[in-house]
Amino acid sequence: MMYSGYCSKELYEYFVRVFGIDNAQAMVMALRAPPNRYYLRVNTLKISKQGLLDLFKHKGFEVHEDELLPDAIYLKVEGPFEVPKGGKVVVADKFAAESVYIGSNLYCPGVRRADPSISVGDEVVILSPRGEVVAWGIAEMDGNAMRARKKGLAVRVLKSKYRAPSLRTLEEYNLGYFYEQSLPSILVSWILHPEAEEVVIDMCAAPGGKTTHMAQLMGNEGQIYAFEKSPKRAERLIQNLRRLGIENVKVIIHDSRYVHVDYPEIRADKILLDPPCSALGVRPKLYETRTLREIVGTMEYQRQFLKAASKSLKKGGYLVYSTCTLTLEENELNIKYALDSLGFKLVEQPLVLGSPGLAIEGAEKLQRFYPHVHDTPGYFIALLCKER
């Protein structure tokens, strides 16, 4: 067995057991790179897909329609490129390094270490915490300031390993014409497909990609209760609601594991549950630090949301469960728990773009997305109906 330094040996061996050695190796390689397509969801409450395509093309972007999802478009991610290795050194934290890796500039909060001899205008090479070269650029402040300041541009990146489109400075972004969202994430709301007259709960709503998409599919009618326990994340959700012109969402800052206890009056026709997960499918990721013990703990946490959802969903109502991770524990085994203990049944999904699920009866009704097969983040989607 060829061990990959991408993650712990224990986690790599888990991947090999579940997916086979060839798939495990290919998956780990794919996780280190971004998908080739950078997806956007068109906000059809404000603009047509063709209208947004025309605006992008007028500005010189090469933009394409997705073949199957009617509100999805994409741009290409460029790379990999050779990054110059000369210059003084700045070490970014893991999160910042992964952003810089696809072309973002490096800001002070992401600086872990900086050569104190760096002066403004110096050429610098940016390393990950493990010493991998991720980008090269020009220092916008001296090395001591990079480490001391809590905000500000530290390094203007000129060359990165990959280059994803930078769109948030566009007028079209500020006008709320689009939302940056992966293909499987866009698909989730199409699977649940809430309608205008329905009551919907989004149990873990921030930053709002799926919440705002559901509102869009509902034509800004009906009612969505968007739960988010973190006030800081809830503020980001509210900002996105405003930017996108969403009017049928009520944001509730509360832990939705207790929605059935603290908000018994809310009875939902449909529920979206995209719970906190180990995020093993997120791309690009330079390396992974999570352990199997953490994954099992996350599974138990996710089941608390499923239990609450079963109490707040009307009989005959539908629930979509989705994650951006790859493990059986957080995906199929949680669905088995919902089937065995919470009165749900599996439902065939109306639109299938991924591969079948694994390991449980009815797995053919589940969807999995694999980075090395579908060139997307690793993702999981299940559609359930409440029988009792």
Image: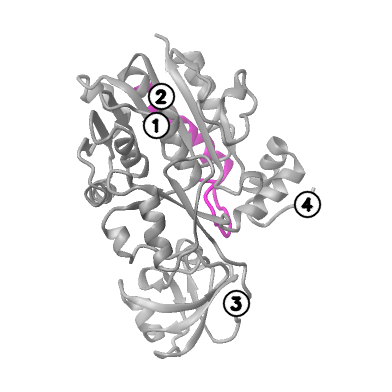
Q: Can you see residue 277?
A: no
The residue positioned 56% from the left and 57% from the top of the image is 34
Q: Which mark, by number, is residue 83?
A: 3
As drawn, 196 above or below 87 = above
The residue positioned 70% from the left and 54% from the top of the image is 4
Query: Can you give x and y, in whole percent of width and height, for residue 51 in the image?
Result: 36, 53
Marks 4 and 1, how far apart at CA: 36 Å
Q: Are marks 4 and 1 in contact (CB under 8 Å)?
A: no
Marks 1 and 2, how far apart at CA: 7 Å
In what element is the residue under mark 1? strand
Could you say which quadrant of the image residue 217 lies in?
Answer: top left
- Nearer-N-terminus badge (4/1): 4
- Nearer-N-terminus badge (2/3): 3
- Nearer-N-terminus badge (1/2): 1
- Nearer-N-terminus badge (4/2): 4
Q: Which residue is mark 1?
A: 273
Q: Which residue is mark 4?
A: 2
Q: Are marks 1 and 2 in contact (CB under 8 Å)?
A: yes
In what element is the residue under mark 3? loop
Q: Can you see residue 252?
A: yes
Marks 2 and 3, how far apart at CA: 45 Å
